[in-house]
Amino acid sequence: MPRLQGASSYDRFRTEAEEIGVPRDAFAAARLAGPLATFEGADSWVEHPYRDGVALLGDAAATSDPTWGQGMSMALRGARVLRDALAGTDDWDAAGHAYAADHDRAYAVVHRADGWFEELFMEPGPEADERRARAFPLLAADPTRVVDVPSSGPESPCDDAARHRFFGED
Ligand SMILES: Cc1cc2nc3c(=O)[nH]c(=O)nc-3n(C[C@H](O)[C@H](O)[C@H](O)COP(=O)(O)OP(=O)(O)OC[C@H]3O[C@@H](n4cnc5c(N)ncnc54)[C@H](O)[C@@H]3O)c2cc1C
């Protein structure tokens, strides 16, 4: 989809917002008050972000959908894990590979959990509505059902059992 960029995109922004369900009235008195821009929100990542003495950290290693607010934590976590690996051995090549292996594992968890949040909270359509109708009352009654990866990090449970509880499929 073409980017929205600058004041000339405002009409298209309104049209597209209305198409996805924003009430027409919401924009009745609206004026453009600042820059209008869009950015790529899809996840992108490299496998094993270390090679030949060069480690990629933060968004250079993996960007995740900012909707779920995981990128800064992943960047800081990566810096800590790489620091600890380098400080723990004189074999810095091995340390780089250990960091990259940990990053692959941790990012896979964040990616999986983000996907579940998107499926449950953002996906449109009747099947998604059904999913929400089943899960939301259960989540409201027992907040421990909510997958905790976004708050507590990639060591939190994110296996099939966690998914079943989150989606109310247990
Ligand atoms: C809209 C939005 C909301 C977000 N909300 C959250 C949130 O709530 N919580 C969260 O954890 N994360 C959030 N993130 C993600 C978070 O901002 C990033 O994951 C994080 O900033 C990545 O840090 P970084 O140091 O890897 O990269 P960056 O913060 O992008 O830093 C890279 C720096 O390098 C500079 N640079 C680039 N090229 C060059 C060059 N050639 N020479 C010199 N300098 C250069 C750039 O100007 C930039 O300052 C959000 C991201 C977006 C876009």
Image (spheres, grey):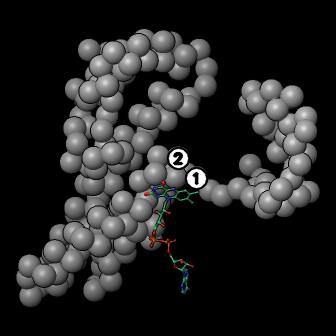
- Against 97, is 116 above or below? above
Mark 1 crowdedness (10 Å alpha carbons): few <14, some 14-19, many ≥20: few
Residue 14 has which mark? none
- The residue shown at (33%, 67%) is 76
Q: Tell me which amino acid carries mark 1.
A: Gly
Residue 158 found in image quarter: top left
- The residue shown at (11%, 85%) is 91
Mark 2 crowdedness (10 Å alpha carbons): few <14, some 14-19, many ≥20: few
Which residue in the protein does label 2 denote? 67
Q: Is residue 53 left or right of residue 131?
A: left
- Against 50, is 11 above or below? above
**C-beta proximity under 8 Å, tags 1 and 2:** yes
Which residue in the protein does label 1 denote? 41
Residue 98 found in image quarter: bottom left
Front-most of residues 11 and 108: 11
Disc 1 on helix, strand or loop?
loop
Q: Tell me which amino acid carries mark 2.
A: Thr
Q: Is residue 45 left or right of residue 41?
A: left
Residue 55 found in image quarter: bottom left
Disc 2 on helix, strand or loop?
helix
Q: Quadrant of the C terminus?
A: top left
Q: Is mark 1 within 8 Å of ligand 1?
A: yes
